[in-house]
Image: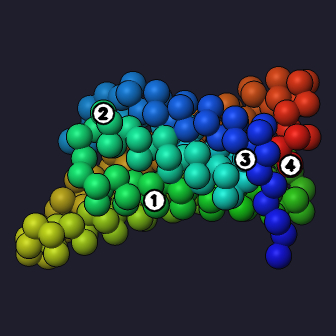
Amino acid sequence: MKKTKLNTYTVTLMGVMAALVYVVTLFRFPLLGSKVHLANAVCLLSGLLLGPVWGGVAAGLGSALYDALAGGYDLANVLITFVSKFAMAWVCGWLFHREKGLKHPLWRLVVPCVIGALTYVALYMLKTLVFQLFVYGYPMETAWVTMLSKLVPSLINAAAAMVAAPVFYQAVMPALRGVGVLQKIR
């Protein structure tokens, strides 16, 4: 098993990414009964830059802090947010750092973002179903209607993240390479 390296540069970049996730989540707009934002793109970017574990921690922490401090959610929802955002960044980071064999570099960047974003959508739909059925006690028909109403905005968020995360990655990589940060966190 490969050891993950945690040093001052990694912790600092994790903190920066968690803060970016938090701040980007503040800028959102309502659409079809939900809120659309680019925080998921920053979560995916965390996985791309920091790898699965530390990128997942940054994504989960930034999102959970938003839910706890600005979102007004209870502890259960904060923990669910941490786990689902961690999973999104983990999947993206794991695929990106594992799949060095893909020939075209754009596909190597886009495929992990697509799968990571869809992982989050699936987990969010599962959370919605569980809450509708077991926490609120609604019948299955009501749960399905609620899930469908949340699916469209979730897919819009996912699509935005799939497009924005690779763009963000390409934008920050020259600067991170130029100052030597990447060599110190990998």
Give the mark nearest the N terminus, 4 or 3: 3
In the picture of the structure, the residue carrying the numbered disc 2 is: 70
Q: Could you say which disc has been placed on residue 50 in the image?
A: 3
Q: Position of residue 147 (x, y in %)?
A: 25, 61
Tag nearer the camera, 2 or 1: 2
The residue located at (68%, 58%) in the rendering is: 52
Give the mark nearest the N terminus, 1 or 3: 3
Secondary structure of the residue carrying numbered label 4: loop
Q: CA distance from mark 4 to mark 3?
A: 8 Å
Q: CA distance from mark 1 to mark 4?
A: 24 Å
Give the mark nearest the N terminus, 1 or 4: 1
Q: Is residue 128 left or right of residue 63?
A: left
In the picture of the structure, the residue carrying the numbered disc 1 is: 84
Q: Is residue 108 left or right of residue 163?
A: right
Q: Is residue 121 above or below residue 15?
A: below
Give the mark nearest the N terminus, 2 or 1: 2
Q: CA distance from mark 4 to mark 2?
A: 33 Å
Q: Could you say which disc has been placed on residue 186 in the image?
A: 4
Secondary structure of the residue carrying numbered label 2: helix
Q: In the rendered structure, which amino acid carries the disc numbered 1?
A: Ser
Q: Is residue 138 above or below residue 14?
A: below
Q: Position of residue 82 (x, y in %)?
A: 44, 55
